[in-house]
Image (spheres, rainbow, N blue to C red):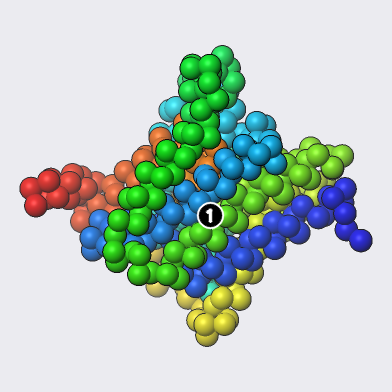
Amino acid sequence: MMGLDNPWALPLFGILTGIVVGFVARRQHFCTMAALERYWFANNSIGLRAWVLAAVTALLCTQSLIAIGAIDISQSFYITENLSLVGSILGGLMFGFGMAFVGTCGFGAIIRLGGGNLRALVVLTGLGLAAIAAQRGITGHFRVWVLDPMSFDFTAAGSQSTGTILSQATGLNLQYPLALIIGITALWWIFRSSDFRQEHAKIWGALIIGACISLGWVWTTTFEAHLFVETQIEAGSFVTPVGDTIMQIITVTGTLPDYGVGLVIGVFVGAALAAWKSNDLRWEACDDARELGRHLLGAFLMGTGGVFALGCTIGQGVSAFSVMAISSPIVMISIAIGARVGLGVLLEGSPFGFLRAISFRKNG
């Protein structure tokens, strides 16, 4: 019987959770890049609202669990005392630019790979290797020597969670009330769209994805209390765990797979099951060397930028947002700007195409 003291149980829970996330995301076409493109170029906000709903669901679930004492996420790297502001901005811009060149993020690439997209395999391989290099390789030197020293210290506040900082400043425990205010405001924006209110499948899909991501806090904090090995407190990210998965596949690392590796594997399996059930399995490859080069460049930028920013669209946009980390909105705004600039280069031949789009929206 596999109990909580068995280190293999944690990645197994990651796999099971990932299967649900991958299946739902594939069936509902849950993709950050696609949501942004439709919003910018087709004035369609349904995908974006679904993505925000997933993030808000994770926020409310996580903060409710914290409020009742079910989880303790104080050791999460998202809310450590040091905030690398330059790393968050630069990493976010790099990730967004790379995401535009690839057409999706790391999470979306796993979803595509589940359907037989070999371009996604190229992207994930490049992303994973770039993440390893930025974490403990050649580009990691730049991070340690240049980015890490330019960090803001929030030791006096206890963490870089906005709820903790506000509570420390006022002397009142305002973490959960702040989460409710953010959540209610976001829910008002999400459901004010009558078009989105009719998308019942997407609504349920976003709710399930957000709840499953927040479950990561439950699994990792629970196992951390029972395992005799160090356990990383995490919810869901698809940059560094992709690199860790590659390392687990190709070499004996001396450590067992963690929750993040299990989640990556589970998302792939869930996406493959959804593609099989929908009869949507088909092999796809790059059309030419130019497309291959663009995907490799995008993968490098996402892997490197994701480590610099401590997360991706799911890692910072959902997981970090669920603990109200200051880095979350900074990174996500940077990712959005990077993605829009990347699309300007890719589709309009100019990195300043997004400025024309903004001007058009104001004048229109």
Percent coordinates x, y for residue 37 in the rendering: 30, 59
The answer to which quarter of the image holds residue 64 is top right
Q: Is residue 129 visible?
A: no
Q: What residue is disc 1 on?
A: 210
Q: Amino acid at mark 1?
A: Gly
Percent coordinates x, y for residue 271 in the rendering: 57, 70
**Residue drawn at (69%, 37%) of the image:** 69
Compare residues 8 and 200 and report the one nearer the observer: 200
Relative horizontal placement of residue 105, taking residue 131 as reference (left or right): left
Compare residues 300 and 149 and report the one nearer the observer: 149
Relative horizontal placement of residue 363, taking residue 157 as reference (left or right): left
230 to 15, vertically: above or below: above
Question: Outermost residue, bottom direction?
Answer: 279
Which SS class for mark 1? helix
Local packing at callout 1 (Cα closer than 10 Å; few below 14, some 14-19, many 20+) is many
Percent coordinates x, y for residue 248 in the rendering: 73, 54
Count of marks placed on residues: 1
Percent coordinates x, y for residue 172 in the rendering: 53, 21
Compare residues 279 and 305 and report the one nearer the observer: 279
360 to 151, vertically: above or below: below
Relative horizontal placement of residue 354, taking residue 310 as reference (left or right): left
